[in-house]
Amino acid sequence: MTPDNKTDWQEEGVEVPYQEISPEALRHLIQEFVSRDGADWGEAGCTLEDKVEQVLGQLRQKKARVVFDLQTQTANIVVRC
């Protein structure tokens, strides 16, 4: 894959410490993330609040991070590599 001819989509952005996001905005971001089509949470019967708390826990444990995509001007939650 060359820089001029990307064949795979790749998020190009900057990490935003979740602690610097207002609690309300962070909750909305996580809610949008966990309610996306195709999200597989395994355990049926898991509430939206359960899912939000799981993702918040992953952010706190540094297993996930918030990234602001400079090209699309959107924020996303991604697994930390």
Image: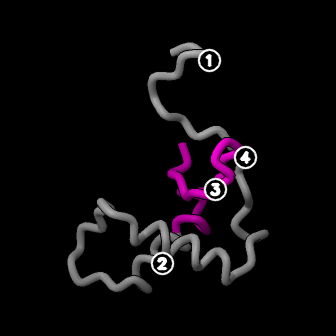
Name the residue tied to disc 4.
14
Tell me which label, 4 or 1, sits earlier in the chain.
Answer: 1
Q: Residue at x 53, y 52 (%)?
A: 78
Name the residue tied to disc 2.
52
Amino acid type at image mark 2: Val
Q: CA distance from mark 4 to mark 3?
A: 11 Å
Name the residue tied to disc 1.
3
Q: CA distance from mark 1 to mark 3?
A: 21 Å
Tell me which label, 2 or 4, sits earlier in the chain.
Answer: 4
Q: CA distance from mark 2 to mark 4?
A: 22 Å
Left or right, 25 with reference to 6: right
Range shown magenta: 58-81
Residue 52: x and y, percent?
A: 48, 78
Residue 2 vertical position relative to residue 14 in the rendered view, above or below: above
Amino acid type at image mark 3: Thr
Foreground disc of the pair 4, 1: 1
Which colour scheme appears in the figure? one colour
Q: Residue at x 71, y 51 (%)?
A: 15
Left or right, 16 with reference to 44: right
Q: In the image, which disc is placed on residue 13?
A: none
Residue 1: x and y, percent?
A: 50, 15
Quarter of image, res 44: bottom left
